[in-house]
Image (spheres, rainbow, N blue to C red):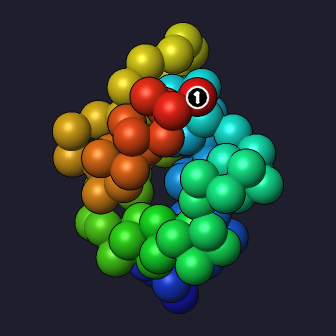
Amino acid sequence: MGFQGNVDLHFWITRGMARRLGVNLSEAMHEGLLSQADFAQMVNRCRNCDKSQGCLAYLAEEGRGAAPDWCSNAAVLRELSALS
């Protein structure tokens, strides 16, 4: 099973990217800003992206900032970040 098939990996990449923007996805769901279906779609978009290695390298760097432009969830994460 490659990176695309590893649901757990992409779950954590999605959460890590959100964290880099200061977004708590659990809190966003609790507040009704993000549905469970929306979150599942985010993880699925991540699974279908071929940039997982880049994400892992990006997340290994310290600091906060924006999701990379090539992140398939960048727009959603920017929107949630603006609401936080």
Does residue 73 lie above or below 55 as drawn?
below
Residue 55 drawn at (x, y percent): 41, 45
Residue on which the image places disc 1: 84
54 or 17: which is nearer to us?
17
Which quadrant is home to the C terminus? Answer: top right
Pinpoint residue 20: horizontal percent, then vertical percent: 54, 28
For residue 82, above or below residue 55: above
With 77 as the anchor, is 23 left or right in this view?
A: right
Residue occupying image coordinates x 43% and y 18%: 65
Residue name at image x 21 percent, y 46 percent: 70
Q: Nearer the viewer, residue 7 or 57?
A: 7
Q: Is residue 81 left or right of residue 16?
A: left
Q: Is residue 34 visible?
A: yes
Q: Residues within 10 Å of mark 1 (few under 14, many from 20)?
A: few
Q: Which residue reaches farthest top?
A: 63
**Can you give x and y, in whole percent of width and height, for residue 6 in the image?**
58, 77
Question: Residue at 39% of width from left, 40% of height from top?
Answer: 79
> Can you name the residue that lies furthest to the front here?
32
Q: Residue furthest left?
A: 69
44 sits left or right of 29 in the view: left
Circle count: 1
Residue 3 visible somewhere in the drawing: no
Residue positioned 38% across, 71% down in the render: 45
Residue 64 place in picture, x, y as percent: 51, 16
Looking at the rendered structure, the secondary structure element under dot 1 is loop
Mark 1 residue type? Ser
